[in-house]
Image (cartoon, coloured by chain):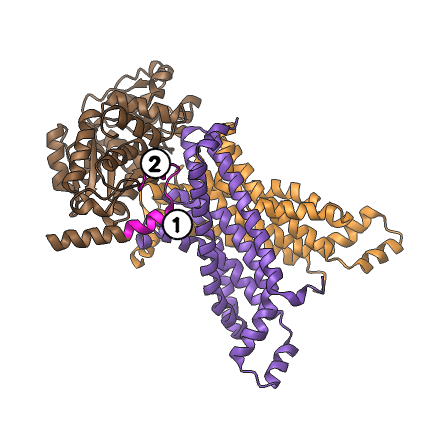
């Protein structure tokens, strides 16, 4: 299994565009996942009976093979990027919902009571007190969801998308290891870089946690 | 009519723009795409998205279509490896793709499983009748790639196999390997049973003349393999193609299947020219360059089009 | 959508669908075999590693980072890569599944060991316990709940991912998903997906029951 270095040199443009496309799918899914899971998590945090239901449901979604999700979406969104993004979003929900709920749970009751005593309205408390304090746990979820999405995008190669995953099917069909090796390495690098960036974002967003460390 | 064409073009543009920007398509879709202006006439103006199935030759054909269309001034996007016919045709109807390289007989059997047409002209007519509204086939080309049922020299000797009819003498003993869809296809397990009375011991879901089915045949995991006649590995391994005395397998000339919304005179003319030039032997050689020399299907297609005066 | 679920019902209950090599019973057995064997092998690798770094505290940074690196490995790519190296065999499936399961087990085992109170360990040593005694009689029992969480998580992931075996010509419930994709038979795809989910949930419940039995003698 040798690497054909000249193939890599000849395909830098293609590899760049596949990497961009790959990242785009993963990041869109994480953003959508956040948009969906934030309100759901607030709901699950406030309404106890809903909590078990929502978390249980998201856990069950996690057990469904991702390729099946992509295929079952075909009647809805066809062979498009939308199918890829919806499929990935579903998987990010599992992590994001759980972490956001746990983040909100971790806010001390005393802090919330203090805000209430100062006459802060509930929505304002949520936005300016609870969510910022929950941020470290939420960000931990965002990091896991991002790495997971980046690794999962390639499954969409079975429905003709999949970013770097296209290198896997290509190499498979032609008995050609080079594109496969390049695809795996680039996926790992993407995950690594994205994770490092998220750590930096978290550092910037939560200045109050720094002194403790 | 005019309004319909206009709406079609708009819908096509709306669909293909996000595909172009977001998908990035195949490994090699960038160099060729987007360079030509929109000099074409009629409804191919918004560009044509070419879908291809999950095997090498179909991608070579997709990029050949792209090469000749670009030369005619039509913008193209090739989406390689989308899947099987069963996935591609709904996508064509739904507007995710506009054009795909098809095979006459196999397409006919997909649309009309009961059809017994075998002569090319007859099949072309039957296709026109069987196609759903909004889709049409353009004139078929010279090149042909048939399905073949193949055994190793050793298996042929051991069981006395030379025709598909011989398979029935070994009913319940042989394992057949093919792409999953072949299990339900007329040109496949269904037709072999109806026409030749063949019953296999087991069907193994593998791939379309790809590494799985060929690997399994070599290893002896399957006795009979469904391959394409343009696959150079058949000769290279001295495998035996079982003959088809009852014409179960129809002629498989390559035929462009296109959505009405994109089938203007520019598209028709360019694809017809390609069809009149490309021969089976040439196509086989192009497949070999991609599979064995690891060249890009797009480069192979562009070079071919240039060498044969189909593109500059 | 409704029609799809209605057809799923008849797909699941039809007698034909359950027998033969392509029957649900056979595919289910294959799927269980792939999943359980892969998880066992992963546990055999990951548990000692997790316990060792948890006990000694050495190499934790490296192991945890390697584990999160492992989580980013694209399974499809790994399967294809091993396939190209080894040819038509079960290696691609098992290597990919084990690689998937190891990180969850290592990180959770380490987390469990790490959470054991240092005072408790000191007390054990103070009573004259040796290193391996502290590990087996004090740390391991206390870390067990988190270790089990890691095993359960790994098993769920492996069961869902064992679908990939069908991509490289093997069986398991993924056969229905990949064949259904090629034939555009969505009922078959849904059937395969539902069966995989049921297997994952049932195995998870079984492990959690096992966990409860193991801890019955100890108040939480």
Query: Is B289 located above or below residue C59 in the figure?
Result: above
Residue B92 is at least partly visible in this image = yes
In the picture, the quarter occupied by the C terminus of chain A is bottom right
**Could you say where residue C120 lies in the image, as x and y percent from the top left?**
81, 59
Image quadrant where residue C2 sits: bottom left
The boundaries of the magenta stretch are B15-34
Query: Is C123 located above or below residue B129 in the figure?
Result: below
Query: Is B184 located above or below residue B285 in the figure?
Result: below
Numbered badge on residue B54: 2
Instruction: Chain B: give its colour.
Output: brown
Comparing C201 with A32, the one in front is A32
Which chain appears orange? Answer: C
Q: Is residue C179 magenta?
A: no
Distance from Cα at disc 1 to Cα at disc 2: 17 Å
Do residues under tags 1 and 2 come within 8 Å of each other at their CB atoms?
no
Which chain appears purple? Answer: A
Q: Residue furthest top?
A: B157
Q: Which chain does tag 2 point to?
A: B
The residue shown at (11%, 53%) is: B2
Numbered badge on residue A22: none
Q: Are marks 1 and 2 on the same chain?
A: no
Q: Which chain does tag 1 point to?
A: A
Numbered badge on residue A70: 1
Secondary structure of the residue carrying numbered label 1: helix
Mark 2, other Cα within 10 Å: few <14 / some 14–19 / many ≥20: many
Mark 1, other Cα within 10 Å: few <14 / some 14–19 / many ≥20: many
**Could you say where residue C153 lies in the image, as x and y percent from the top left?**
57, 52
Image quadrant where residue C178 sits: top left
């Amino acid at each position: 299994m040798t690497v054909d270095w000249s193939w890599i040199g000849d395909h830098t443009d293609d590899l760049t565009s596949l990497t961009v496309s790959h990242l785009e799918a993963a990041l869109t899914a994480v953003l959508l996942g956040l948009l969906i899971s934030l309100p759901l998590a607030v709901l699950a945090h406030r309404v106890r009976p809903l909590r078990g239901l929502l978390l249980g449901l998201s856990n069950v979604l996690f057990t469904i093979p991702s390729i099946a999700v992509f295929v079952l979406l075909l009647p809805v969104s066809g062979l498009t990027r939308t199918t890829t993004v919806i499929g990935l979003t579903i998987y990010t929900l599992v992590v994001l919902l759980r972490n956001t709920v746990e983040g909100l749970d971790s806010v001390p009751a005393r802090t919330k009571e203090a805000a209430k005593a100062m006459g802060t309205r509930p929505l304002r408390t949520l936005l300016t007190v609870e969510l910022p304090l929950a941020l470290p746990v939420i960000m931990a979820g965002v990091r896991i969801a991002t790495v997971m999405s980046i690794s999962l995008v390639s499954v969409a190669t079975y429905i003709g998308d999949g970013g770097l995953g296209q290198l896997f099917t290509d190499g498979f069909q032609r008995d050609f290891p080079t594109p496969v090796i390049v695809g795996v390495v680039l996926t790992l690098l993407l995950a690594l870089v994205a994770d490092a960036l998220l750590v930096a974002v978290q550092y910037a967003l939560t200045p109050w946690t720094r002194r403790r460390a | 009519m005019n309004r319909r064409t206009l709406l079609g073009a708009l819908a096509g543009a709306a669909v293909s723009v996000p595909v172009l920007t977001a998908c990035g398509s195949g490994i090699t879709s960038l160099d060729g795409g987007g360079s030509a202006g929109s000099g074409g006439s009629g409804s191919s103006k918004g560009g044509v998205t070419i879908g291809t199935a999950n095997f090498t030759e179909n991608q070579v054909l997709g990029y050949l279509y792209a090469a000749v269309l670009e030369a005619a001034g039509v913008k193209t996007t090739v989406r390689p490896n989308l899947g099987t016919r069963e996935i591609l045709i709904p996508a064509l109807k739904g507007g995710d793709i506009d054009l795909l390289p098809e095979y006459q007989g196999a397409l006919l059997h997909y649309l009309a499983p009961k059809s017994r047409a075998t002569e090319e002209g007859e099949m072309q007519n039957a296709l026109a009748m069987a196609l759903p509204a909004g889709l049409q086939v353009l004139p078929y080309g010279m090149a042909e790639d048939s399905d073949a049922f193949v055994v190793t020299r050793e298996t042929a000797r051991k069981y006395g196999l030379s025709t598909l009819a011989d398979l029935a003498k070994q009913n319940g003993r042989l394992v057949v390997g093919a792409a999953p869809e072949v299990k339900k296809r007329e040109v496949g397990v269904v037709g072999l049973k109806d026409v030749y009375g063949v019953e296999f011991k087991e069907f193994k879901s593998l791939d379309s003349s790809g590494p799985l089915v060929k690997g399994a045949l070599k290893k002896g995991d399957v006795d009979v393999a469904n391959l394409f006649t343009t696959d150079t590995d058949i000769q290279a391994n001295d495998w035996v193609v079982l003959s088809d005395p009852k014409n179960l397998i129809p002629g498989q000339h390559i035929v462009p299947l296109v959505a009405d919304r994109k089938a203007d005179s520019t598209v028709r003319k360019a694809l017809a020219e390609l069809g009149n030039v490309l021969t089976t032997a040439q196509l086989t050689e192009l497949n070999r360059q991609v599979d064995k020399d690891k060249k890009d299907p797009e480069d192979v297609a562009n070079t071919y089009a240039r060498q044969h005066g189909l593109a500059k | 959508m409704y029609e799809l679920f209605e057809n799923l019902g008849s797909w699941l209950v039809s007698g034909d669908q359950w027998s033969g090599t392509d029957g649900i019973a056979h595919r289910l057995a294959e799927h269980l075999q792939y999943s359980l064997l892969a998880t066992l092998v992963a546990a055999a690798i990951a548990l000692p590693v997790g316990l060792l770094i948890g006990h000694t505290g050495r190499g934790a940074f490296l192991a945890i980072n390697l584990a999160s690196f492992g989580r980013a490995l694209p399974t499809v790519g790994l399967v294809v890569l091993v396939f190209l190296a080894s040819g038509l065999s079960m290696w691609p499936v098992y290597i990919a599944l084990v690689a998937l399961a190891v990180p969850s087990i290592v990180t959770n085992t380490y987390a469990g060991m790490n959470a054991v109170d240092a005072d408790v360990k000191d007390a054990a040593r103070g009573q004259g316990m040796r290193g391996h005694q502290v590990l087996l009689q004090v740390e391991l029992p206390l870390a067990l709940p988190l270790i089990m969480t890691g095993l359960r998580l790994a098993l769920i992931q492996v069961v869902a991912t064992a679908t990939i075996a069908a991509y490289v010509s093997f069986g398991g419930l993924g056969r229905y998903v990949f064949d259904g994709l090629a034939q555009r038979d969505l009922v078959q795809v849904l059937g395969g997906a539902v069966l995989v989910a049921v297997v994952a949930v049932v195995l998870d419940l079984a492990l959690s029951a096992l966990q409860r039995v193991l801890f019955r003698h100890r108040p939480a």
